[in-house]
Amino acid sequence: MNFSLGKRLVFLAIIFTLNACQLTSNNMESAKKIANVQFDGAVKQLLDHRSGKGLYQQDKTEKEKKYWPDLSPQALEKKYQQRLVIAATFTAIEQHSLSAENKINYAIIKAQLDNNIAQYHFKAHYMPFKSESGFHSNLNFVINNTQFSKEKHIESYLNKLSALPSYFEQNIHWMRQGLASGITQPQAVLIGYEQSILAFIPQYAEDSEFLKPFTTASKLIDTKVLAEKKQQLIEILKAKVIPAYQSYYQFFTQEYFPNARKTIGVSETPNGIEFYNNRIKHYTTTEMTAEQIHRLGLSEVKRIRQEMKEIIVKTGFKGSFSEFTHFLRTDPQFYAKTPLELLKEAAYIAKQMDAKLPSLFKHLPRSPYGVAPVPDSIAPKYTTGRYIGAKNDSQPGYYWVNTYALDKRPLYVLPALTLHEGVPGHHLQISLNGELDNLPAYRRHAYISAFGEGWGLYSEWLGIEAGIYQDHYSNFGRLTYEMWRAARLVVDTGIHVKGWSRERAMKFMTDNTALSTHNVKTEIDRYISWAGQALSYKIGEITIRNLRKKAEAKLGQDFDVREFHYQILKNGSVPLKVLEDQISVYIEIALVKIAKEKRKVEKVK
């Protein structure tokens, strides 16, 4: 070959390669731009759908009439079909071409959309209630969140309650469809449930809980107007609201309860296994199978049981594990005498933890929280405690403590419960999430169960570091709560996939925890009626603790717990895979920074 010709060919090849690289680079940039524009468009479409704007604009007159969700068959089917179209728009987006932030956004908002689609597909609206609450009792939140700052707020409240009967009728319609198709809550978890309906049927309308907002009405509203509006509400209660509850009570006791299914596992319902697998993915954000989760639960139960035995030895108790838990369940020293005593103890523990927060966190939420009892109307079948987030910036969050059946609310578990529901658990995480102004609204107010409940359980463990468990009994209480969550992995999958009976599930929980018999019963009924949700706690907590172990191992003496917690919480509530990726990036960046600092020191030497 002619040498000069060869040089020219090589030169041309290099130029061609460079041009090709430039074209490839340009194409990649173009693909990224297109993907991000498509994503922004899909998000706008979904948000318009949620708010009834743009293509989904509702007739103004009709919109004003809808004080409650429209649950008519036509409305639900229409929303379902619209969501399928929007989901197809998201699916068409090249996810790998999205920006780093939009990849997280996509994972979160697409999961929200997929869950809404799945709920309709599997006919979840046939069961608009769980063992502990339902559409009728959730009106407690409407009452508690209503503030009469202006006269128009009272008018809106009256109109809302006037429209309540049709909302109840629509829910009853779907419950009848559930009876006809075998998709009901199990009869076993509904014993005594009618009491939660009766709680809203007072002997005299003047005693109704719905009048509560008048007690906190603004003093700027004329007293004569307040008196007139209150009387109007009393008439609405007599004519519409109380009759709606009476009608629901009659339907529930005479038609629904007698004909509810006698089986307890969701696998016994049409498409039940498919639905349960869908719930696993939704609540854990993983690809784990029911069998893998069941085995993980058994492994965790075995590990925690050994730790519990070691603490029993430290207490000096002479007897078996079951004898020790019987002692804890029955000895009066472990129980509050009055509701106020229990609430005060919870508040004291909360303030103890408040003082520890600066040593563990770089950023703390602006909003405060209070400690309050679970409302009497739902307390008998309600869980032992729960966090209720603030509706807006003018309201606090609340840590609800169940003061019903005080002899079933042991003080030795109260530190763990308080850390989970208050700080550094749900209040801290959810409040910080809502204050992340750099995130879109659909992420600021998102709650991903595996992340949120995993963080809550991790927060209980963090109490060891904070010095909250000051005796062997409270530390045993912490392990009881961890065991409770580990046992959930076993009993939830056992009930819904493996054909476990309610009695077997209760025995497993009773044998392995120090929870009171009452708590065991209400919890098992909760898992039966809320398939899959109980799986999120332990799987999320294991992920967070493993990530901490990884960071501690990689960073050694340079590990900073405040920085680690910031990195966990900085992007809000995210799927576990996203969380794992963001902590891996944090570790890599930290290692580079540490290496640079070491080089600087070596140069000085």
Image (tube, helix red, strand yellow):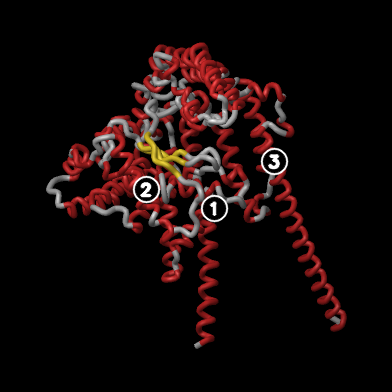
Q: Disc count in the image?
A: 3
Identify the mark nearer the N-term, 1 or 2: 2
Between residues 145 and 314, which one lies in front from this camera angle?
145
Please, is residue 188 above or below residue 519 in the view?
Answer: above
Instruction: Report the amino acid beneath label 2.
Output: Ala
Rendered location of residue 367, percent (x, y)? 50, 47
Is 124 displayed left or right of 556 in the figure? right
Q: Position of residue 563 (x, y in %)?
A: 48, 62
Q: How dense is the environment of label 1, judged by Cα within 10 Å: few (below 14), some, or many (20 and up)?
A: some
| Gap between marks 3 and 2 measured at Cα | 41 Å
Q: Earlier in the sequence, mark 3 or mark 2?
A: 3
Instruction: Assign a secondary structure to mark 2.
Output: helix
Question: Quick check: can you spot residue 544?
Answer: yes
**Mark 1: which amino acid?**
Val
The residue that disc 1 covers is 578
The mark closer to the camera, 1 or 2, is 2
Dot 3: what SS? helix
Q: Which residue is mark 3?
A: 44
Give the numbered dot on residue 121.
none
The residue located at (46%, 35%) in the rendering is 276
- Give the Cα distance between marks 1 and 2: 31 Å
Give how far across and how far down residue 477 sits, in percent. Answer: 28, 46
